[in-house]
């Protein structure tokens, strides 16, 4: 097997080994067999294109085209032309599959079922990574950067998995990458001939691995061992990070600082909710007087980008013994201390700690950190709630309607942060908020009006069958369709409150659970919930409940409660003995009947039927993207053509030497050629006319490259001059020093030698001479000259001349064939008399 074929095989194997990290994410894992077959075809096309050989860009284009045809054949055969050619319908189908796969990835627990969308994302992703690796490692002969796409593939898988077996897949992926590097090293070393070949240790024994290869193996194994062992050592932790707060480690291990990143907790909440059957995840024992207001808050979402809400990146500290008084809570607000003991089920792994709000003290074992702004606890270095039992002392804050009505404006600093809305938010949101709250005399009255509009008067329905999606118009679409889940109602009310100047955020957690006979409270998956929190100075962050038939309506928003200081709290809207139903129900929130958390796991509803009215169709978007790419690529064609032409010319020494040596490398010890440098060869005893032609072709190619290089930097060629006079002209106009001038004359002398000597031979180092001249001309020219020489080289006009010459030759060839054919037709049959 040749070195290039071995490198191609190792490239495909490395991609497949790295893709094994995706195996735990999807069940069944049969997709990898399909990916392996398609990857083999893709690699085979690349190998065939390189053997032709095609230009590198054409090789990549051929592989990309075949990859698209393969994906079309597998995933969009019915929508494609002839079952394989993708048209507008096939592209639209790809878009629908990708959208469905994206939703499934976010909504299904691990391992997710192998839906068509997920299969497209996994198989298509492996093929894209495989194309990138093959292009870098084989087509462009640089295997080191090929580790980046392999790392990206592994990182995506590691970021989604539970981390229990990540080291195994890292070992597999790293072994594939090292195998690829080793194959490239062997292929490069083979071009040096036998100088590094290992001699047999005993007579008749096969030669061993070359010394650099043996060293590379040892280094690779050592590096792999270090990579596996170092993470197990008790080294200082890295502070923060993109995945911080999601169970992978935040802050320092000693509790002295760090940050929690903006990772949406709805994702981890989905994983716990997406099971086949509803089940109890938390058990509470509390001394609260009324259980109907026992909400368990996980985290607050305060960063609104116009599409969805997520937690901001916050500073985290060690858990204090006593939590400070909640922001904004004044001394005249009635409150009482509540003690709650919470036990989490072994299967409920949540990085944020569910607690009643606001907490004032928490007792829990393990590595936990405190985020002061949201008053939440987050697990440090993989800590989670699974199997944990902890005690929380919290405050039962009981404001009255009068106190909320009289609340002054919030501080400007808090208002500035929590009333921000992006410019992409549709104007209809603010306009409808103004209409709903028209005539309301205070922020409190506006908040109650918004809550009543969603929960009572607006005609909204709690529907578990609503499609979930995102986009700038998602809130407006929800307000129009009036169907959604808890998260839709809370997101929309919080956004509307911000447009009215009321500080707002969204809380994620659990609604009150179901009391048991022993006095405990069972919180199950169906109790997962989201609700808006609005800020009132003197009271602090205050819960509202806009979702119909879910949770409990706060007493301070009930009309009869406005005349009393200590209102009677209403009963929970959920039945204590409610059992999970096998069918979707309007009274069941965030159930896992269909393995989906459509209500508490994504942004806002998306009406598939009206997608065409809301924006440009997918196939048109793809068309415009391709057109834009073409427009951007066209100006770069001269540069790409010039780079390719230079590479071919200066690499012709190897090809000419191979022809002269009967197909073997010029440095491989064949008759007639002696080893020179990497850029040229010396003909000692030309064994054939073919070898002489190869040397002439090589020297002339190098000379043309020198002429074109000078042309790119402003020295126009003069075809009427001899090589010697042309060289002198380049030295004179280019003002080259003596050393560089010698390089120009050496190339010109080689041209004269191969053209006029009885036995042509090429001097060594001609390619390096051209590089030396180019560097001198580049240093001499100004920045505009240097940029033009690269981006818009003058010599690129030869591409047009070449096309014209080929067209002329083609026409002449067809004309000659036509004349020959006509003569045959006019010729009489044999033996016929004239």
Image: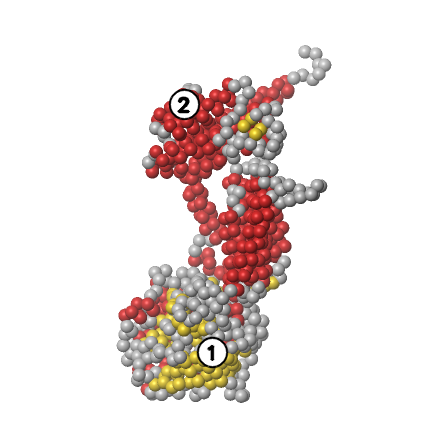
Q: Secondary structure at mark 2?
A: helix
Residue closer to the observer: 544 or 179: 179
Residue closer to the observer: 441 or 140: 140
| Left or right: where 4 falls relative to 629 | right
Task: Report if the CB atoms under discs 1 and 2 are less than 8 Å apart.
Answer: no
Q: Earlier in the sequence, mark 1 or mark 2?
A: 1
**Residue drawn 62% across and 53% down?**
34
Task: Characterize the local packing of mark 2: few (<14), some (14-19) or many (20 or more) Cα atoms within 10 angstroms.
Answer: some
| Left or right: where 234 falls relative to 454 | right
Q: Which mark is residue 230?
A: none
Q: Position of residue 611 (x, y in %)?
A: 46, 58
On the question of residue 78 being in view, the answer is no
Which residue is the extreme one toward the top?
834
**Residue pointed to by mark 1:** 364
Q: Position of residue 593 (x, y in %)?
A: 56, 71
Q: Position of residue 769 (x, y in %)?
A: 45, 31
**Residue drawn 51% across and 62% down?**
231
Alpha carbon distance from label 1 to label 2 = 85 Å
Q: Determine whether 379 is above or below 666 in the image.
A: below
Q: Quadrant of residue 659?
A: top right
| Left or right: where 383 falls relative to 671 | left
Q: Determine whether 790 is above or below 809 in the image.
A: below
Quarter of the picture containing the C terminus is top right
**Residue drawn 32% across and 77% down?**
328
Colouring chosen for the image of the structure: secondary structure
Quarter of the picture containing the N terminus is top right
Residue closer to the observer: 130 or 703: 703
**Residue pointed to by mark 2:** 726
Task: Characterize the local packing of mark 1: few (<14), some (14-19) or many (20 or more) Cα atoms within 10 angstroms.
Answer: some
Q: Secondary structure at mark 1?
A: loop
* Number of numbered discs: 2
**Residue drawn 39% across and 32% down?**
712
């Amino acid at each position: 097997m040749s070195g290039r074929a071995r490198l191609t095989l190792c490239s495909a194997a490395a991609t497949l080994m790295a893709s094994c990290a995706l195996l735990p994410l999807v069940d069944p894992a049969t997709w990898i067999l399909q990916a392996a077959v398609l990857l083999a075809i893709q690699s085979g096309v690349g190998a065939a294109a390189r053997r032709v050989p095609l230009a590198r860009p054409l090789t990549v284009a051929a592989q990309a085209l075949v990859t698209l045809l393969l994906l079309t054949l597998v995933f969009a055969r019915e929508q494609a032309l002839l079952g394989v050619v993708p048209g507008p319908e096939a592209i639209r189908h790809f878009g629908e599959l990708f959208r469905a796969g994206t939703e499934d990835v976010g909504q299904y627990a691990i391992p997710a079922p192998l839906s068509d969308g997920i299969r497209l994302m996994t198989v298509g992703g492996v093929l894209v990574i495989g194309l990138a690796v093959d292009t870098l490692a084989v087509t462009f002969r640089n295997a080191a950067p090929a580790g980046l796409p392999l790392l990206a593939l592994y990182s995506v898988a590691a970021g989604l998995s539970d981390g229990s077996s990540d080291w195994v897949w890292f070992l597999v992926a790293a072994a594939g990458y090292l195998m690829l590097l080793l194959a490239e090293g062997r292929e490069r070393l083979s071009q040096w001939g036998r100088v590094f070949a290992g001699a047999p240790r005993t007579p008749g024994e096969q030669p061993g691995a070359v010394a650099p290869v043996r060293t590379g193996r040892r280094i690779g194994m050592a590096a792999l061992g270090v990579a596996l062992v170092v993470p197990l050592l008790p080294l200082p932790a890295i502070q923060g990070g993109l995945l911080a707060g999601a169970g992978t480690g935040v802050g320092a291990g000693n509790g002295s600082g760090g940050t929690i990143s903006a990772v949406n907790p709805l994702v981890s909440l989905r994983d716990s909710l997406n099971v086949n059957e509803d089940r109890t995840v938390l058990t509470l024992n509390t001394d609260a007087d009324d259980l109907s207001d026992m909400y368990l808050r996980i985290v607050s979402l305060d960063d609104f980008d116009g599409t969805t809400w997520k937690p901001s990146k916050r500073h985290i500290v060690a858990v204090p013994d006593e939590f400070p008084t909640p922001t904004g809570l004044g001394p005249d607000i009635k409150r009482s201390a509540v003690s709650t003991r919470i036990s989490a089920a072994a299967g409920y792994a949540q990085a944020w700690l569910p607690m009643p709000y606001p907490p004032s003290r928490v007792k829990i074992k393990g590595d936990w950190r405190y985020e002061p702004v949201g008053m939440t606890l987050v697990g440090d270095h993989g800590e989670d709630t699974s199997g944990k039992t902890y005690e929380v002392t919290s405050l039962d804050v009981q404001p009255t309607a009068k106190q909320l009505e009289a609340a002054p404006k919030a501080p400007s600093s808090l208002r500035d942060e929590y009333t921000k809305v992006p410019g992409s938010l549709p104007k209809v949101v603010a306009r409808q908020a103004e209409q709903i709250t028209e005539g309301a005399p205070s922020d409190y009255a506006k908040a109650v009006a918004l809550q009543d509009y969603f929960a009572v008067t607006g005609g909204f329905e709690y529907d578990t069958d609503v499609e979930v999606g995102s986009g700038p118009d998602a809130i407006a679409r929800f307000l129009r369709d009036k169907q959604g889940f808890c998260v839709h109602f809370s997101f929309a009310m919080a956004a509307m409150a911000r447009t009215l100047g009321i500080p707002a955020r969204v809380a994620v957690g659990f609604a009150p659970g179901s009391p048991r006979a022993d006095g405990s409270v069972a919180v199950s998956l169906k109790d997962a919930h989201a609700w808006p929190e609005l800020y009132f100075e003197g009271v602090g962050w205050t819960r509202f409940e806009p979702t119909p038939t879910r949770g409990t309506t706060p007493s301070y928003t009930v009309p009869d409660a406005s005349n009393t200081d200590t209102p009677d709290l209403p009963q929970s809207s959920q039945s204590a003995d409610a059992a999970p139903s096998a069918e979707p129900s309007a009274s069941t929130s965030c159930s896992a009947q269909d393995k989906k958390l459509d209500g508490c796991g994504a942004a806002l509803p998306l009406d598939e039927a009206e997608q065409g009215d809301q924006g440009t169709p997918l196939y048109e978007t793809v068309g415009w993207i391709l057109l834009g790419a073409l427009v951007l690529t066209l100006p770069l064609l001269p540069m790409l053509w010039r780079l390719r032409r230079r590479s071919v010319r200066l690499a012709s020494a190897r090809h000419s030497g191979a022809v002269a040596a009967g197909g073997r490398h010029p440095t491989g010890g064949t008759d007639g050629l002696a080893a020179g440098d990497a850029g040229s060869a010396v003909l000692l005893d030309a064994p054939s006319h073919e070898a002489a032609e190869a040397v002439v072709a090589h020297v002339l190619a190098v000379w043309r490259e020198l002429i074109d290089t000078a042309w790119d930097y402003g020295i126009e060629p003069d075809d009427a001059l001899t090589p010697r006079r042309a060289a002198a002209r380049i030295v004179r106009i280019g003002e080259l020093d003596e050393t560089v001038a010698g390089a120009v004359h050496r190339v010109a002398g080689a041209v004269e030698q191969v053209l006029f000597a009885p036995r042509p031979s090429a001097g060594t180092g001609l390619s390096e001479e051209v590089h030396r001249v180019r560097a001198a001309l580049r240093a001499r020219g100004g920045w505009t000259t240097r940029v033009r020489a690269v981006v818009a080289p003058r010599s690129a006009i030869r591409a047009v001349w070449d096309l014209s010459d080929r067209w002329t030759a083609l026409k002449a060839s067809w004309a000659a064939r036509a004349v020959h054919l006509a003569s045959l037709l006019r010729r009489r049959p044999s033996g016929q008399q004239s």
